[in-house]
Amino acid sequence: RSQYSAPVTAVGGASFTMNGGFIQNNDYSDTMNTGAVYINPQDGNSSFEMNGGYIRNNQAHSGAVFVGDIQPDYTHIASFIMNDGLISGNTGNCGGGVGTNDRYAEQNIGAAGIRIEDWSTTYKVPAAFTMNGGTISGNKAIDCGGGVYVASNTVVLNAGQILNNTALDQGGGIYVGT
């Protein structure tokens, strides 16, 4: 397995819609930048919409659902919209349930003179997550963000439940990185 693989991967402009069913019992903890579902913005706007079903009991480096890329091209976006469903019992390093990362802080973009306020309007920020419903519960992060790891300024939590998640470092429910 490569570090950019997952049981379900949307890349190159692919869209994945989950209306029911299960993604469960996968172990990708030995590879970096992965999730049970990996939404990668390379070579096209890629997306995942969850309207039902279960993502549970997976182990992955960057959360059960990882949105973003380690080397984004900033011309495409990856997005995850959660309308319903359950993300539960997963373990990851940065984000047990959902991990987002647009690389602004990690690549020290601010030092290049780009303000965080301009980040999503000037460039295609590669990691968007919108939660309109559903439940993220019982997930665990080895580092930060047991439920949701936020390292992106395009994360919006409108509705749903985030409960009973844990992190060994910070942000049992939600961790917002700077």
Image (spheres, helix red, strand yellow):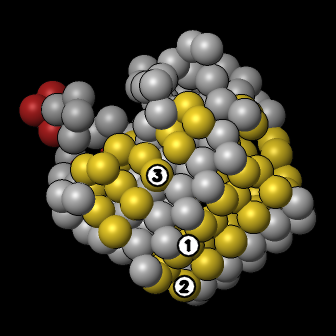
Q: Which of marks 1 and 3 is in front?
A: 3
* Distance CA(mark 2)–CA(mark 1): 6 Å
Residue behind mark 2:
161
The kind of residue on which mark 1 rests is: Ile
* Distance CA(mark 1)–CA(mark 3): 12 Å
Q: Position of residue 142 (x, y in %)?
A: 30, 50
Q: Position of residue 59 (x, y in %)?
A: 53, 44
- Left or right of 82: which side holds 104? left
Residue behind mark 3:
91
Q: Residue at x 62, y 65 (%)?
A: 87
Q: Is label 2 in a helix, a strand or a loop? A: strand
The answer to whether residue 52 is seen in the rendering is yes
- Left or right of 52: which side holds 103? left
* Distance CA(mark 3)–CA(mark 2): 18 Å
The answer to whether residue 151 is seen in the rendering is no
Residue behind mark 1:
136
Lower position in the chain sequence, tag 2 or tag 1: 1
Q: Are marks 2 and 1 in contact (CB under 8 Å)?
A: yes
The kind of residue on which mark 3 rests is: Thr
Q: Is label 3 in a helix, a strand or a loop? A: strand
- Left or right of 86: which side holds 125? left
